[in-house]
Amino acid sequence: MRLLHTSDWHLGRTLHGLSIIDAQRDALDHIVATAREKDVDAVLVSGDVYDRAVPPVEAVQLFAETLRCLSKICPVIVSSGNHDSAIRLGFGADLFRDRLHIRTRVDQIDEPVVLSDESGPVLVYPIPYLDPDSVRRKLAEEPLPRSHEHVMAAALDRVRTDVARRESEAGAPLRTVVMAHAFVGGRGESASRSDSERDIRVGGVEIVPTTVFDGITYTALGHLHGAQEPSRGPAGFVRYSGSPLRYSFSEAKHTKSVTLVDLGPDGLKSVSAVAVPQPRDMVELRGGFRDLLDDPDNSAHAQSWVKVVVTDPIRPDYMYDELTSRFPNVLSVHHQPDQATVTVGSIVVSPTRDPLDVVADFVRAARQADITEAEHEVVREAYEALRREEGSA
């Protein structure tokens, strides 16, 4: 059996204020084409279908269109992520046909979607995002400790109980797949994060150990945007498919993909990635203002989405206008001097302070450099002109 694992579509997201709905449509069209060309038996979407609980209309329409196309090819199984509204995403789930399964309810954790091939059944358990504060009283007779590890472990206990019952009835081991949306890592290890992922810490604890999924044939994770494998081995294979698009400059070097999972008669056979084409390259450029403008090598980034960090001690005049002229697709411009030469504490503003001193403090804090005599003179003249105007009113 061949499964296609994907997650974190974040439909409706913008990139530094730029709508990328067309790029998302192209990425999902590529996923549909991959499902068809690779002859997959089911598509698994492990959460964060949308970027926010109340998605824009075009995002809902794109999701509906994609589900329609995918479900013509094979069954589609979708679980909710921390960005999704479980109620909205799960609306009408009980009315869908056999080729579409959307799971958002905690009480369905131990109810698998049963797929079959010539070797028998494959049990797929879609686990929605488990917010500890919301579910720790639902997953046990006594409230569970307030952590992601404890609620996920309780969910897997329910899964294993159901698997044991079904294996007893079948008289043989069964292949199992769990879909989950969480921050998963090994003990003492750190998975690779991106800036575009929402913090899900509760009480300072967010990591779910990979050991929670021991014994599961394949765990299809969502939440982290970089494709990675927190665990692979005889105890089980745990993998993030990653997002299909780059959603922050911290992902500029990511190779975005979906994951193909091949199951043999006795378990996992192979796991491979299929790259998803990106709308543009992403690059972060850092340096002096004139160097950034004059460097001929930067011509290669004319079509890229660009983040520019200018390191001059003093903010250059017309910085944004000149950079956007040089890089037509610039999305972010920052002025960050290389060395902070002045340390400024809290700026105190009171009726007794000289307004010129307040302005000087502000300039010092904003650009980490003292106000020049010429600038001070301009501010003084403006202030005195304002005082004269007030006096004649």
Image: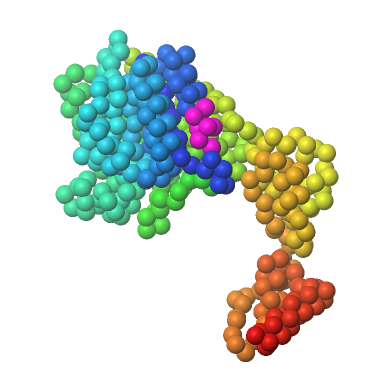
Q: Residue at x 30, y 51 (%)?
A: 132
Furthest-front residue in this view = 393
Residue shown at the point (58%, 40%) measured from the top left: 251
Span shown in magenta:
20-27
The answer to if 304 sits in the magenta stretch is no
- 327 over 94 or under it: above or below: below
Out of 104 and 267, give the one closest to the viewer.
Answer: 104
**Magenta stretch: helix, strand or loop mostly:** helix
Does 235 appear above or below 190?
above
Q: Give residue 300's position: percent from left, percent from top.
A: 75, 34
Q: How far across and how far down the image is residue 174, in percent?
A: 27, 21
Residue, far top: 118
Say left or right for 83 vs 99. right
Looking at the figure, which quarter contains the C terminus?
bottom right
Could you tell me which residue is drawn at 30 percent across and 25 percent down?
100
Residue 35 figure quarter? top left
Q: Is residue 25 magenta?
A: yes
Looking at the picture, the colour scheme in use is rainbow
Q: Nearer the viewer, residue 187 or 213?
A: 213
State the quadrant of the N terminus.
top left
* Above or below: residue 311 compared with residue 352: above
Percent coordinates x, y for residue 313 in the rendering: 77, 62
Q: Residue at x 70, y 71 (%)?
A: 363
Give the x, y percent position of residue 182.
39, 42
Asked if residue 206 shows in the view, the reply is yes
- Left or right of 266 in this view: 361: right
